[in-house]
Image (cartoon, coloured by chain):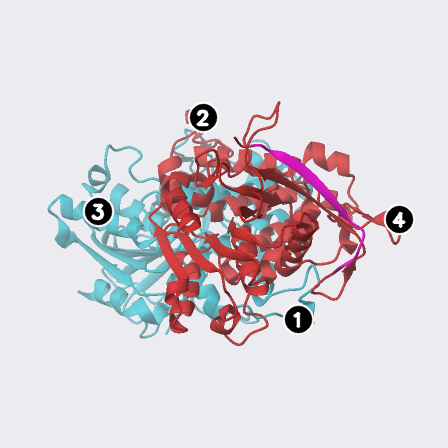
Chain colours: A cyan, B red
Amino acid sequence: MLNLKTGKYEFKEPLYLESGRILSSYELVYETYGELNEDKSNVIVVCHALTGSHHAAGRYDGDSKNGWWDGLIGHGKGVDTNKYFVICVSILGSCYGSTSPLSMDESIGKEYRLNFPVLTISDVVKAQINLFKKLGIQKAHAVIGGSLGGMQALCFAIEFPEFAKKTIILASTYQSKPWAIAFNKIAIEAIRRDPEFKNGQYDESFIKQNGLNGLAYGRMAGHISFLSPNSMDDKFGRNYVETDGLYELFGRFQVDRYMEYNGFNFPKRFDPLSYLYIAKMMNIFDCTRHYDTLESALKHVKSQITLISFSGDMLFPPECMSEIHDAFCKMGRGAQSEYIEIKSDYGHDAFLVEIDKFDIYVKRALER
Amino acid sequence: MLNLKTGKYEFKEPLYLESGRILSSYELVYETYGELNEDKSNVIVVCHALTGSHHAAGRYDGDSKNGWWDGLIGHGKGVDTNKYFVICVSILGSCYGSTSPLSMDESIGKEYRLNFPVLTISDVVKAQINLFKKLGIQKAHAVIGGSLGGMQALCFAIEFPEFAKKTIILASTYQSKPWAIAFNKIAIEAIRRDPEFKNGQYDESFIKQNGLNGLAYGRMAGHISFLSPNSMDDKFGRNYVETDGLYELFGRFQVDRYMEYNGFNFPKRFDPLSYLYIAKMMNIFDCTRHYDTLESALKHVKSQITLISFSGDMLFPPECMSEIHDAFCKMGRGAQSEYIEIKSDYGHDAFLVEIDKFDIYVKRALER
């Protein structure tokens, strides 16, 4: 049984942010799957990626799609909801119900918009810890996440070393590198300069209906980084959509159609301000920021770490993950970390798509 | 002596295009370096890339930069102007003086704009052959080009097998793959949807002064594909431009500044319609298009082929080039082709930047 439940928690107390700024109050929405056991020892925290949400598994009536990690979470799956109580929280800043740039700044009675404070991965993790406490959860069996979710999982392990026994990180990195920052740059510039963005004061319902083109261009860049030359060769080749369009200036290849579809539909379901704030959060993520070396950042980690990378990942190539394992080895603590490289041509998206290639490693990490 | 000269030729006769359309008249601008010898046996044709021009070497009074391949072409250099007569033509469609979408369509007395015909690599090569004939040049010692220039060089070898004794192709491919097409897609969509583009009827002087933002986003995508994760790590790391900008939403990393500089300056020197037409030309390039296999396309080639790829090239990875050599080997004609992979972290840009790593191979190919 998946036993999908949703929840929302309103914090009346402030959240002190890494930047020095304060959210005087905030809300978090979340989903849970499975049942919390009596001694609360079966909690698994799932962290979502840049454009994900708390809706990780199951399906709502009327929806055409399951949650984004439904292949991994459920009855008898890699994260087995018969055994575990799974919780996934929409991060602060995102646009699916938790406090975001479109929320009211109660102190001035207006929406934050571009006055929303810059958030870090540490901030969104701290907020989740606060939520878990309110729910009576002091510890987790595991934290698991891919991409931006993997950054959160690593941050849980470093900043809250007593929290989770196990940490499973997929297709992620311990710091954003310039290659990833450059992809985000296209979105950032195309959003802020889009005439319809109006310096963040856009009409929300207009944008929801029409989508912001600037965000579409950024999303297209994102989709390039999510795939790889090989996965595109396999998926699209040089096939045309309209074979008679060869000599038409805008005649389309199948890859063009894929980019259009994914680029221009996305801005209808995702808010451009949220995208700016989460891209920023991703860009500034560097778990070594307050330390001299990666080893000194990882020194306090008590969790057992499982690192799963994908050979064809162009956004966070395997080296980004193996470096974390190498750092544990350098400290003479190689047994605390396990590094698995999955052979995949799928690119970064593999952590969402090729679940049958890695679910066994997740299961093993959780149960051993 | 470089002996830089420029020329322009006006063709009064029509050019029949691959698409079935016709350019009733057209012009080509070009530069030459060195001296044509008596028996006209020392000609080297240089082909430029997507945003290049006929200005391949030397410097004009008042300019701050040399031509784009100045490191390779000149006195005692890889392409030695003491020995060779070098010619580089601005391709049809580009915006540096040859016939382009901004030229007058004499038949209707208006600029072509979006009525300009789609051009192929074959078309722009055929136009160059026509020019060489007018200049009294029937044959070349060599044709050399990188990226889109390499596509032209390969096309010379296949479609005009008697023309050049040697063909040197760098950082290119025998067909555009979906990965490259996807990068171009960002530019194509961002240009055509930019409100200032006005369906191609933009005010030329306004665009020259301000640049079209849509083209800037596309160029930023281009610059990602020209570099590589490693080259970005080396060039930029995670260094900030303003160290106090860490918690500012638009606080910049050095890689952000690089993207801004290269993205937003480019549209002031390059026309968006030209970009659309040349991106299309690149996308549809496939030298196997009229053949069953790569081997049957290469069968007629008489030129000695030198293929130079760069290990870190993300746009046209080494496989794109080694496949051409493999095809010659499969035909039992391995001796006709030489494949050299240059170890480089620089990415696709290496063919413009790391000239000292490959000029010796160019010299050797020309002289042996």
SS category of the residue bearing label 4: loop
Chief secondary structure of the magenta portion:
strand
Front: mark 2 or 1:
1
Nearer to us in this view, A32 or A357: A357
Whether labels 4 and 3 belong to a single chain: the reply is no
Q: Identify the amino acid type marked 4.
A: Gly
Q: Residue furthest top?
A: B62
Distance from disc 3 to disc 1, alpha carbons, whole Å, reads: 58 Å
Distance from disc 3 to disc 2, alpha carbons, whole Å, reads: 36 Å
SS category of the residue bearing label 3: loop
Q: Chain of mark 3?
A: A
SS category of the residue bearing label 2: loop
Q: Residue at x 57, y 38 (%)?
A: B35
According to the picture, the residue beneath numbered tag 3 turns out to be A162
According to the picture, the residue beneath numbered tag 2 turns out to be B242
Q: Is residue A67 visible?
A: no
Q: Chain of mark 1?
A: A
Relative image position of residue A316 (x, y in whole percent): 36, 51
Distance from disc 2 to disc 1, alpha carbons, whole Å, reads: 48 Å
Distance from disc 4 to disc 1, alpha carbons, whole Å, reads: 32 Å
- Read off the magenta span: B3-15
Whether labels 4 and 1 belong to a single chain: the reply is no
Distance from disc 2 to disc 4, alpha carbons, whole Å, reads: 52 Å
Among the 4 quarters of the image, the one containing residue A301: top left
Q: Is residue B13 magenta?
A: yes
Q: Chain of mark 4?
A: B
According to the picture, the residue beneath numbered tag 4 turns out to be B109
